[in-house]
């Protein structure tokens, strides 16, 4: 059962009016009157779901507007707010009723107001224009009937109480929705990270081979150097040559590791910064190309202009490239074609970079073209794919205000990515390879 807030303040400079309103609101034990009968008819619902409508009001009176404002302030701070105020229009020598109402609403904006007046000091339009909360205002002309006072008090205190209940319910609902959204965001971030790791896992065999080969070179050259320095009159030039080979091979491994770190880095900040398209493509190829090579699939890549930079989340864009290359690889594995290839084309069109990823496969069947971007849809065998690759790719590109689509006019499978070019520079300062390797080794140690 809801308990109605019965706290009312009466603001009038005339003591007789204050007394008349108070008398109308006074409850006499055992009294039966028209308003009580009316309430029994109007509120005849189940008592369990209905507010208690006894007429025992807690009344405060004030002679002037400023006095009323201070009473409202004190009551609000004490967490015992007034639900209703009867306010006179004229209260010389102090502020008038409109100014009093404005100040009351500044402190307690949900207070219901009955504006009592015997004069036409302000038109209805002026009153509505002056007050910012007219839905909580009723104008009552003097002289008034005590029955009007009773009816207004019963209705407006009930309205205020249920308004509080509704706002609390809305706040609770918003808190539940916020908590649910946070949970869904966290779950989505986890799915994205799992998809990243799944995509990287598909390339794991190629990556291991890509790293093992240069490690074998390093081991072989290190043994050779050891043999050279064991001689008393060793050739310094030969030592330098072997050391250069070890350094070059170390660079190769470092680039592969840095590319892997760029992909698996978990970053939910979604901060977009300028990144070199060339570096992002190279990071992707460092991870993917060995897998393609060992399965007889050629990767043909247009020269990537150093001047093209994109304002983006680089981990998402690299993930887009890996997803598309993984899908192409899986499709080409089952293809019967003798020559298998994947091409990456670039074109700058009107301030945008267009990236086309095309494979030698026969294309996607018409009945699947509308489904491939749906989450969890996959044509791969059970356990062979998450069904999130193309869905996440589309979502990531949309996050960058770009376009991602299947070119249905191409006889092969051709996915197109369009992104805004951040800036074109004639000369880009890239990190020194030796310094990058040194930092990587130091951070590992």
Image (tube, rainbow, N blue to C red):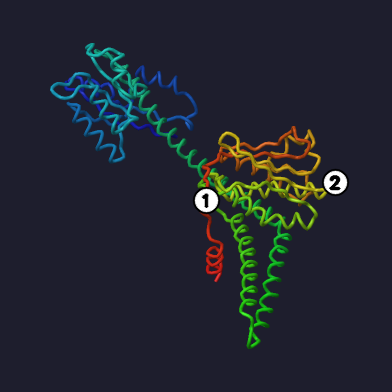
Look at the image and tell me whether residue 236 can be seen. Answer: yes
Instruction: Establish if 120 lies above or below 75.
Output: above
Labelled pair 1, 2 in contact (Cβ < 8 Å) = no
Query: For residue 208, what is the image quadrant?
Result: bottom right
Residue at 30% from the left image edge and 21% from the top image edge: 114
Residue under label 1, please give it. Answer: 428
Towards the viewer: 364 or 59: 364
| Residue labelled with disc 2 | 337
Task: Residue at 30% x, 17% y: name it.
Answer: 139
Residue 251: where, in percent of width, then height? 61, 64
Q: Which element carries disc 1, helix, strand or loop?
A: loop
Q: Is residue 25 left or right of residue 329?
A: left
17 lies left or right of 343: left
| Gap between marks 1 and 2 measured at Cα | 41 Å
Q: Nearer the viewer, residue 120 or 299?
A: 299
Percent from the top left, x then y, of residue 364? Answer: 78, 38
Report the front residue among 373 and 256: 256
| Secondary structure category for the residue under label 2 | loop
Q: Position of residue 77 (x, y in %)?
A: 28, 40
């Amino acid at each position: 059962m809801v308990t109605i807030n019965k706290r009312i303040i009466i603001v009038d400079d005339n003591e007789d009016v204050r007394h008349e309103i108070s008398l109308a609101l006074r409850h006499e034990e055992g009294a039966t009157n028209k308003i009580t009968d009316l309430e029994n008819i109007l509120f005849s619902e189940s008592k369990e779901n209905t507010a208690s409508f006894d007429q025992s009001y807690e009344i405060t009176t004030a002679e002037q507007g400023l006095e009323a404002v201070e009473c409202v302030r004190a009551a609000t701070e004490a967490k015992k707010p007034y639900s209703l105020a009867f306010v006179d229009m004229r209260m010389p020598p102090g502020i008038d009723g409109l100014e009093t109402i404005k100040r009351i609403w500044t402190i307690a904006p949900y207070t219901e107001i009955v504006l009592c007046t015997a004069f036409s000091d302000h038109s209805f339009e002026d009153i509505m224009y002056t007050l910012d909360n007219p839905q909580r205002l009723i104008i009552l002309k003097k002289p008034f009937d005590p029955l009007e006072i009773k009816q207004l008090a019963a209705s407006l205190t009930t309205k205020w109480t249920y308004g509080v209940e509704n706002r609390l319910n809305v706040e609770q609902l918003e808190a539940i929705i916020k908590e649910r959204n946070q949970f869904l965001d966290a779950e989505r971030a986890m799915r994205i990270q799992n998809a990243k790791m799944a995509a990287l896992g598909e390339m794991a065999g190629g990556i291991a081979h890509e790293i093992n080969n240069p490690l074998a070179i390093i081991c072989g050259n290190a043994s050779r150097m050891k043999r050279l320095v064991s001689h008393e009159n060793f050739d310094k030039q030969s030592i330098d040559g072997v050391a250069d080979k070890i350094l070059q091979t170390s660079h190769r491994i470092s680039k592969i590791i840095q590319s892997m770190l760029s992909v698996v880095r978990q970053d939910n900040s979604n901060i977009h910064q300028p990144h070199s398209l060339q570096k992002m493509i190279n990071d992707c190829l460092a991870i993917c190309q060995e897998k393609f090579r060992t399965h007889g699939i050629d990767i043909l890549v247009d020269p990537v202009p150093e001047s093209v930079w994109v304002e983006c989340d680089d981990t998402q864009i690299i993930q887009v490239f890996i997803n598309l290359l993984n899908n192409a690889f899986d499709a080409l594995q089952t293809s019967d074609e003798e020559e298998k290839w994947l091409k990456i084309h670039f074109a700058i069109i009107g301030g945008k970079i267009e990236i086309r990823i095309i494979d030698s496969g026969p294309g996607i069947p018409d009945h699947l073209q509308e489904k491939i971007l749906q989450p969890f849809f996959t044509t791969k065998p059970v356990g062979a794919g998450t069904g999130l690759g193309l869905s996440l790719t589309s979502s990531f590109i949309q996050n960058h205000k770009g376009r991602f689509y299947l070119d249905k006019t191409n006889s092969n499978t051709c996915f197109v990515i369009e992104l805004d070019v951040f800036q074109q520079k004639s000369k880009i300062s890239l990190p020194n390879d030796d310094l990058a390797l040194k930092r990587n080794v130091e951070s590992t140690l």
